[in-house]
Amino acid sequence: MQTATEAQLDGARSTQGGKSVPRAHDKTWVLGIIIFVSLWLWAAFIRGRGFARPLQIVLLLGALAGVGAFAWLVNRFLRQQFKLESGQAARAVAFSSTAFLLLAVFLPEYLAGRPLLARSLILLGLSLVLFVAYVAVWLREELPATNQSRTPFSASKVLFIFCIVYFFLTSWIALVKLHAFGYVGQDVAYFTQCLYTTLHGRLFYSNMYHDLLYGKAVTSDFAGHNQPVLFLFLPFYLLYKSASTLLIVRNIFIVLCAWPIYRIGRRYLQPGMSAILAMAFLVVPAVFYQNFYDFAPLSLAAFPLLFAFYYLLEGRFRPFVIALVCTQLVREDLVFAVFGLGLLALWQRRSPRWVLFPCFFALFWAFLSWKIVFPHFLQGASSAVGSCFAFLGSTPLQMLRYVIGHPAIFLSRSAFIYIKQMVDSFGGVLFLLNPLWLFAVPYVAINLLGDAGGCNSAMIYRHYALVPTVLLFGSFLMSVEKMARNQGRQAPGTKPAAVVLFVLFAALSSTVFVTGKAQFDELETRPWHGEASQIASMIPADASVAVPRYLLPSVANRDNLYQSLRLLEYHHPNAGYIVIDKDWQRMAATEQWRDNYDTLRRLLETSTQYKAIYDSPNYAIYKLCDGCSADLPHREPMKEMHD
């Protein structure tokens, strides 16, 4: 049995006296959309804005009349402009009105709170643009005679230009954020120092984390993650030794994801819709924010994973194997995605090699990582990454019991927000027609459990959200392919074209809804930035230094780097220079570290080993006396996330 939406998309015609007349379900569908849009307008612009209840009712009735008039005017315009019969115009309006379901995706935000007026206006504007796009799609598919002219541009060229603009825009934002000291996390500096020490004979070592988080000496990033992809950054870093190099290379691999997405789309869609698919992927919040939310090698996983998915669909085994290996080299936890592709091949009834290689390779990499690499590099220390899940228990059985006994981890408000933000770009349900989405569940569960352990992993901005989003997008792609098969390769068809456009606009809307003042504040130039840059340049290149977190990327090219915020927690602190920010608010840190920081400041003010060589209302720089050895008291490190 067809739903009202499916029936309207079929383009079947009702006639009376040889003329096309409106169908009853078209009228019912449009009426329902009119009522829904009116209620949304009330929730977005009237409710909770100080209007008296009688006035709210009047405004709601006005909205209802306005939306109804809009539908009537569109119907009249189509009949006059394109010489449509009444039934054709009604079907066009009914099909196009589906665009306003975009408002329904974000209805929970309006029921639970009151989004900013600007967001509501943008969402309404995007819905109207999508409505116009749906009208164009309907006319193209149902009345091909109205669109005989050839498109004057190439879809692939448009996509290429979009990607160039996208790359330069996102990279510009990333660099502005870097120069505005917006990266208050430590990961950019951590990986920059890892590359620096590797070029100087110590394999991906960073005392900034390792000496802080481990009681015993840990000498490589391989103690936390098995991510050989770090070697890829070395030649680029060798050319330009700066934190900005990591950001630019990362952004290149993000924008290159448009390539496999476009090739997947071309299997069953026209070039234009394939290009829109690629654009939609790049503006999904979890993908878009990879370009400027700190840095992690995991951001590179999307590119080879999408190509692995493409070669699986194409049935090209050797490139599939290469793409899988490249995917797994990014990080050890991608074993779930690699294993999942093997199960997907089984579900598709592929030959045994398509199933066995991914599954056995994933198991091999898991054994290599957790039984050989990590124990070797940890040297008996406890994993800082594992501490995120220590609250679950020490054995798999204990962890399972804890999860079963505490379902609120997955049912909390924060979990709901995280999952909703992840699925908003797909209309909440458009990925469910293919089982590939099931392989995203382990990553979502891991992120929620890690977040419950204090690791802030359930955030749509962070790299943790990328892999499950890629898997959801892959499932969505296969759903679109299933729709397109029924309509032939040479025409996009109304159904697949509609869902592709819907996802593009849903992704844009989702990005708008997760972007707020905090993201713009990270780019703002402030009066103290000039002095901060000056201080970074004052530190000798070969000196060991402790600085506020936001200054870490500026001074990361050295053997010994410390956070002044947590200097007393290091096991072997030997900072030759210590930079103190006198304004706690600029530290962007929780109060748990304030006592340690205040203690450090008092010690430096009375120390006989450290002398102030710079002092201003904003900063103080202390230098260790020549021949002296730092004798700072040690405090046990407090729990903090490590990537």
Image: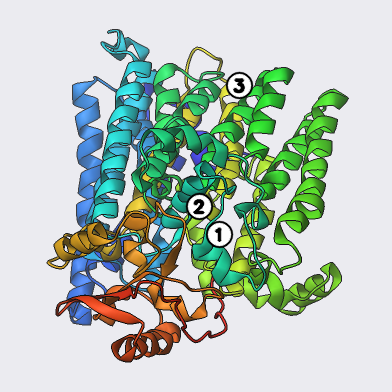
The residue at which mark 3 appears reads as 485
Which residue: 66% across, 71% down? 387
Helix, strand or loop at mark 2: helix
Task: Please identify, in this view, whether the residue under mark 2 or under mark 1 is nearer the observer.
Answer: 1
Task: Please identify, in this view, whether the residue under mark 3 or under mark 1 is nearer the observer.
Answer: 1
Q: What's under tag 2, amino acid-wise?
A: His
Q: Are marks 3 and 1 in contact (CB under 8 Å)?
A: no
Q: In which quadrant will I find the N terminus?
A: top right
Q: CA distance from mark 3 to mark 1?
A: 42 Å
Query: Which circle marks residue 600 in the picture?
Result: none
Q: In which quadrant will I find the C terminus?
A: bottom right
Judging depth in this view, the residue of 122 and 301 nearest the camera is 301
Q: Residues within 10 Å of mark 1 (few under 14, many from 20)?
A: some
In percent of width and height, residue 467 lies at: 58, 46
Earlier in the chain: of badge 3 and badge 2, it is: 2
Q: What's under tag 1, amino acid-wise?
A: Asp
Q: Are marks 3 and 2 in contact (CB under 8 Å)?
A: no
Q: What's under tag 3, amino acid-wise?
A: Arg
Which residue: 73% across, 19% down? 317
Q: Is residue 378 above or below residue 387?
A: above
Total numbered circles = 3
The residue at which mark 1 appears reads as 643
Helix, strand or loop at mark 3: helix
Q: Residues within 10 Å of mark 2 (few under 14, many from 20)?
A: many
Judging depth in this view, the residue of 417 and 454 nearest the camera is 454
Q: Is residue 374 above or below residue 518?
A: above
Q: CA distance from mark 2 to mark 1?
A: 10 Å
Query: Which circle marks residue 463 in the picture?
Result: 2
